[in-house]
Amino acid sequence: MSAASLPPSPDTRGSTHRQIWAMAGPIILANISVPLLGAVDTAVVGHLPEPYYIGAVGIGAMLFNFIYHLFNCLRMGTTGPTAQARGAGDHVEVRAMIARALLLAGAIGAVLVALQWPTIAIALWVIEASAEVERYARDYFLIRVWALPAVLGTYAVIGWFYGLRDVRLPLAMQILTNALNIGLDFLFVFGFGWGVAGVAAASVIAEYAGLLFGLVCMRRTLRCLPGAGGRARVLDRARLLRMVSINSDIVLRTLFIVSVLAFFMAKSAELGDVTLAANQVLQNFLVFTSYGLDAFAHAAEAILGEAVGRGDRAAFRRDMRVVFLWSGIVGALNVAVYGLAGHGIIDLLTGIPEVRAAAAAYLYWPVLMPLISVWAFTYDGVYLAATSTRAMRNTVMLSFAVFLVALYALMPLLGNHGLWIAVAAFLGCRGLLLHLVFPHVLRAI
C-alpha cells in the first residue's frame, strides 16, 4: 500500500451522500456476512434430525453474542477517537489508538478464556433448557471460547480502520473469516460428522486466520501514516483514562443490550424446544437488520467524528441528516424484503415442520422491527462520533427497565407474543430517549 492509497482527507470526496455510501456500502457487505454465518450455522444444524441441535447452537451462540457485544467497545471505542484524531491532524494519536486497543483486547481475551468453566456453568444454571440442549451447548462453548482473543483483536483492528475511513480492509477481513468459517462448517459437520462441535471448531480456525490477515494489513497502513509513533503516547495516563472511561460506558451500555438478548433466548427456552428453535430462526432476521443498519452508524462514527475533531458543528448536523435519511430507506427495504420473502427464508433455515410452523406464526414481529429499531441504531453512531458515551449508557438503562416491565407484565398473558412486544418496546424506547437527549449532545460539540 502506498501513501497515495490511504483514505483521503475530509472534504475531498464529493457530497455527503457519496461519502456516506463510500463507507456504508462496503460495511453493509461486511456486516451482512456476519449474520449470514449465523444463518448458515443454524441451517447446518437445522438439517440434523432433532430440534435440540438448533437450540444448543442458539444457546451457545447467544452466550458468545453476549460476550462479543459486551466487548464490542473495542471497536466502538476506537473508531470515534481515531476519527477525531484524524480530523485534528494528530497522526501520533492515530497510531497510539490501535496500540492501546490491541493491548486491551489481549488482556480481556486472556481473562475470558481463563474463566470459561465458571462462565458456562453459570449460563446453563440461569437458562432452563432440556438436558440435550444443555449438553450440546456446553460442548459448543468450550471449543469456541478459544476464539475469543482473536475476535476481540479483530474488533480493535476493524474499529481503527473505520476511524481512518478505510472500509476495504475490514471488508476483506470479514469476508475471509466468514467464508472460511462457512466452508469449514460444511466440511466438519457433513464431511467429518462432528455435529455441533464441528460448528464451534470452524469458528476458532476462521477467527485466527482473519486476525492474522488484519494485523498484516494494519502494519502496512502504519508505514503509510505521517509522523512516527511513540510508546510514551500509547501509555499516556490521561489518554489511557479517557479510553477506559469511554469503554466503561460502552460496556455498561452494551451489558443491558445483550441482557435483552439473553432474556429473549432464556424465556424462549422456557416455552419449549420448538418455540426456542423458532425464535432462534426468527432472530436471524433481527441480526440481519441490525448489521445492515449498523453500517450507517459506523459511517457516522468516522465522518461525524472527523467533524468533531475539526470543531465543525454545521458539518456534523448536515452529515447526520444524510445518515438518517439513508438509514430510514434501508430500514424500509428490510421490511419489504422480510414481508415478501419471510416464509421462504424460514424454510431455508430449517427443515423441521413444527419449527417452520411456529416461526411462521410469529413472523410479523421481525418484519416490523426494522422500522422500530432504525432510530436507536443510527443514533448510536452519532453519539459515538461525539464520544457522548455516558448519555448512551443512561438511555439504555432506562430502556432496559421498560423492557423488564413489559416482559413480566405481558409474557404471562400473551406467551411468545408478549416476549416479542417487550423486545420492540426496548428498541423503540432507546430511539426515543436518544432523540430527546440529542440537543444536549449537540451543544457540547
Image (cartoon, grey):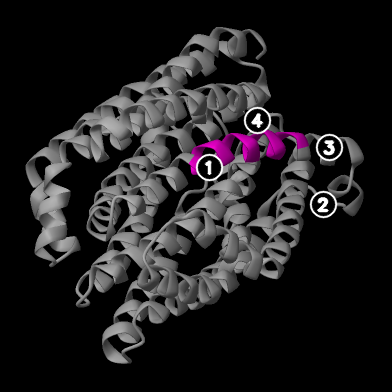
Q: Is residue 262 above or below residue 150?
A: above
Q: CA distance from mark 2 to mark 1?
A: 20 Å
- Left or right placement of residue 78 versus residue 353 in this view: right
Residue 378: image quadrant is top left
First along the sequence among labels 3 and 4: 4
First along the sequence among labels 1 and 4: 4
Which class describes the residues within 10 Å of circle 2: few (<14), some (14-19), or many (20+)? some
Return the residue at label 2: 229
Return the residue at label 3: 241
Q: Residue, x 33% and y 49% (percent of image)?
A: 268
Q: Nearer the viewer, residue 192 or 259?
A: 259
Q: CA distance from mark 3 to mark 4?
A: 21 Å
Q: Amino acid at mark 1?
A: Arg
Magenta-tinted stretch: 245-259
- Element under disc 4: helix
First along the sequence among labels 4 and 2: 4
Q: CA distance from mark 3 to mark 2?
A: 19 Å
Q: Nearer the viewer, residue 100 or 194?
A: 194
The quarter of the picture where the N terminus appears is bottom right
Asked if residue 360 is among those painted magenta in the image, a careful observer would answer no
Q: Residue, x 87% and y 52% (percent of image)?
A: 230
Q: Amino acid at mark 3?
A: Leu
Visible residue check, residue 310? yes
